[in-house]
Amino acid sequence: MEIRSNNIINNRGANISTVFISLLIVVPLFALFLSVFKVDLDNFYYLWDNLLIDYSLNTIYLVLLTSFFSLIFGIFPAWFISTSRFKGRKLYDILLYLPLAIPTYIMAFTYSDLLSYTGPIQSFTRKYVPEISNILNQDYLQIEVLAIIMGLALYPYIYTACRISFSLVGSNYINLCRNLGMSQMKTFFRIVLPISRVAIFSGLFLVIMEVLNEYGAVRYFGVNTFTSGIFRSWNSMQDVDTASLLAVSLFIIVVIFFFLERFTSSKYQFNYSVNTNQESNFSLTRSRLIIVHLICLTPIIFGFLIPILFIINNVIGEFSGINFNKLIDLIFNTLSVSIASALIIIIVGVLFQFFRKISKSRIVIFFSDIISLTYALPGAVIGLSLIILVTSFPNLINSNVFIGSFFLLVYAYSIRHMAVGISPLKSSFEKHPSTYDDTGTNLGLTPFKLFKKIHLPINKSAIIIAFLLCFIDIMKELPITLILRPFNFDTLAVQTYQYAIEEMIPKSAVYSLAIVMIGSILLIFLKNIINKQIDVSKG
Amino acid sequence: MELKFNTMKKYLSLLAILILTGCSQNESSKEINIYSQRHYDVDELQYQKFEEKTGIKVNVIKANADELIQRMKNEGENSPADLFITVDVGKLWQASDMGLLQKFEDESITKNISPELLDKNGYWVPVTYRSRVVVYSNDRVKKEDLSTYEDLANKKWRGRLLVRSSSNSYNQALMSSIVANLGSENTTEWSKGVVANFARNPKGNDRDQVKAIAAGQGDIAIVNSYYIGLLLASEKEEELKAGNAVSVFFPNQGENERGAHVNVSGIAIAKNSPNKENAIELIRYLTSDEAQKTYVGNTFEFSVNPNIKPDKIVQAWGEFKKDPLDLNMLGEKRAEAIRIFDKTGWK
C-alpha cells in the first residue's frame, strides 16, 4: 500500500511538472496567439489571394521531393551497412553521418557556387572540354536542385534512425525470411521496412520540419514556401500580426499531421524482439557489391566530401586574411551556447520520457509530444515571440534583464531544438519494456531511485546521442541568434552567414570549416556510441 | 518528492548561473549601443578607429532591419539602443514612422553631406549611398539600346532581363521610387512589362545576375553598383571575367530625365537612446572625411561627402545624375510597391 500511495503522489507531481515545463516551452506560441487576435484580416486575405496558395503548393512539392531524396540517401545505405559485410563498411558508416555537420544554407551556397558559370566545374569544361560546356551551362537555382541539396544535408536524420532500427529488428526475423527463401530486397521491402516504419517516420519528421522552417537557402533559390509567406508579411508588409497568424497556422498544420500519423501508425505497434547472436549477413555477388558501394558513396561524396573540399579550398585561398583571435572567440561563444542549450534539452527530454513511463496519463503523453513540434517554426519567429512575450508585461518583468541576455538566447535554442533531442530519447525509452518499471516498483524503488538505477543507465547511449545531435543542430542555428543575441556576440554560424549573404563565400569558409570540424568530431563520437548500442543489443 | 526537489534545485541553480553570466552588462557611460543591419568588415574597422580616438566603447548587435525594429519597438523605453543603422533608407523611414527614432540637428555634421541625400524630416543621416543600376552584356547589348528604368518594360527586352526576388529590399526600394515618380497605375503597367521580360524567375543574389549574363542566360540585369566593383576586384579569374563581360549603365541620365535611383545606408538616433552624446559623436565620426574614405576604399559604395571621390574602379563608370526624389518616399511608398510586385507576379 505504501508503494502505491507513494506512486500516486509522484505521478501527480510528474503530471504537474510535465504540464508546467511544456508550457514554458510552448509559451512563445501564446505570444503569437495574442498577436493573432489583433490581426487585420485584410492582409491575410490579400496574401491568400495573391501568394499563399502558390506558396503552399511550393512547400508541399519541396517537402515531398526533399523527403524522397533524404529517404533514398538514408534508408538504402543504412540497410546494406546493417545487414551486409563488405570492405569499407565501417568507414562508410562514419562518413554517412557527417553531412549533418554542414548547415543547409552552407550546402546550398556551396553547390550554387560550384555549379555556377564562374565555378570550377564550368570553368574547367570551358577550358578543356568545350563540347560539353554548353550542356553544363544551366540555371541550377531550381526547386528540384534545392530538394537534392536539402536531401543531402538532412538525410542523416533518417540514416541514424534506420541504422538503429534495422540493427534492432532482430536477426531472427531476417533469418526467418532467408529460410523462407526471400531475397535481401524482398526481406527489406516486405518485412523490415514496415517494421521500421515508426523509426523512419521519426527521422523523416525532423527532415520535414527542417524544410518547413528553412528560409535562407529557400530564398536564395527563389523558391517561395509557407515560411516565405511569414517573412513576406513581417518584413515586406510590416505586419507582424499576420506573420504570427501564419506561424500559428503552420504549427497547427504540423500538429494535425503529427497526430494523424500517430493515429494511423498505431496499428503497426511493434516491439523489437531480442536478437540472437547469429549475424544476419546477406552475401553479395560482385555486381551487387558495386551497386552497394555506389549507394553508400553517393551521399558521402555529394553530401560531405565535395562541400568540405570546396570549403577547405576557400580557406586555403583566404588563409592570410584569417583573424584567429576572432575565430577562437566565436568558437568559444558557439560552444558555450550549444552546450548550455543541449544540456537543458536533455534534462527536459529525459525527465519527460521518464514521466511518460511512470505516469500513463494522456496529458503527459500529449504534452511530451507537443513540445517537439515547435521545431517546424522558423527560428526568427520563435525569437520574435519571446521578445513580444517578455515585453508584454512591463509591470511584471523587466525586459531589459532578458532581451539580449545569454539566458533568453539559451531558452530560445532549447525551445526550438527540443525535437532533435526528444526523437532519440523517445525511441530509446519506448523500446524498453514497462516490466522494468513494475519490477522496480515491486522491489520498493522510489521513482527517483527507479530513474537513477534503471532508466538512466539503460538509456545512457540515447542520452548521449540526443545531446550530440542537439549540440550540432544548435551550433548551426542562425535566425534565433540574430534576433536575440547580446551586444558584440557572434557565433560561427552567424559569421558564416553574414559573409555568405554579402556574396563573400570564400571569406566565410574558415567559419564554416570550424562548424563542420566540430560537428564531424562529435558525429564520429556519436557514431561510436550508436554502434556500441547496436553491438550491445546484438550481444 | 525527492525527485521533484532534486530536479527543481538543479533547474534553479542552472537558471541562476545563466542569468548571472548573461546579465552582467557594463553600465559605464563611456559606451554606445548600436543596432545595425550593416555587417561588413569595414564597419568593424570604423568602430575600432572610433574607439581608439574617443575611448568610447562600441557595442553592436547585427541583424536584419525588421528584426531590429521589432526588438526596439518591444523594448520601448527600456531599449538600450543608441543608434540604428540600415542599408535601406526605407527601413529608416519605417522606424521613424513607428516613433522609434528621435530628431537631431547638427550643422557640423550635415554641412559635409550632399543636401539631396539628407532627411527632410531630420531623423536620419546618410553614411554611404549606392545606385541600383542596369548592367548589360558587352557582347549582346549596345549601350545605345539602354535608356531608362521605364524602358526595361519595353518588348525588346523580352526574355532578356535578370533580377532577384521582390523580397529583396533593394528591389523594393527601386519599385517604391518608381511608384513615387510615376504613380501607382503606371508602375503596375511597368512592372507587368518588366515581369514579361524576365529571362527566368527571380532568384539568387545580385552577383548571380551578373554571372547569369556571363553565362548567356540573360542580357541585362538590375543590380546594386558596388557588386560590380566587388566582382572587378575579385582575385578569382573567372569572377573577374564575369565582371568584365558586363558594363555598368546609369539609367535616366537624359536631359529631362530624373536620374538613377539611389538608396542610402543611414544612421539614426534611437528615441530612448541612453548615450545620446556618444551617439552623435559616432555619427560625426562616420561622416568625417577619414571614415568616408575608409568606406569608399573598402565597399565600392559612394561617399555622402561630395568631395570624396569613389574608388578607382567606380570612378571608371563616370559621374551620374541622381534621382532627386525625397528618399523617405522609398519607405512611404513601400506598401504600395509590395502590392504591385504581388499583383504583377514579380516573385
Image (tube, grey):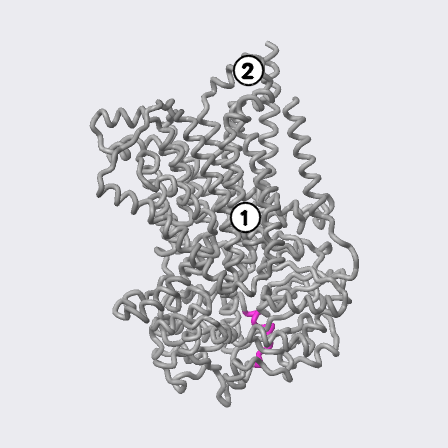
Q: Secondary structure at mark 1?
A: helix
| Crowd band around label 2 with a 10 angstrom C-alpha radius: few (<14), some (14–19), many (20+) | some
**Quadrant in the picture for the C terminus of chain B:** bottom left
Q: Which image quadrant is residue A326 in?
A: bottom right
Q: Nearer the viewer, residue A269 or A347?
A: A347
Q: On the image, numbered disc 2 is attached to which residue?
A: A441
> Rounded to the nearest whole Å, what is the CA distance between mark 1 and mark 2?
40 Å
Chain ID for label 1? Answer: A
Residue A51 in sight: no
Q: Is residue B171 left or right of residue B36?
A: left
Residue range highlighted in magenta = B324-333
| Labels 1, 2: front one | 1
Q: On the image, numbered disc 1 is attached to which residue?
A: A475
Q: Nearer the viewer, residue A77 or A247?
A: A77
Q: Position of residue A81 (x, y in %)?
A: 34, 38
**In the drawing, what numbered circle is on residue B220?**
none
Q: Count up the numbered dots.
A: 2
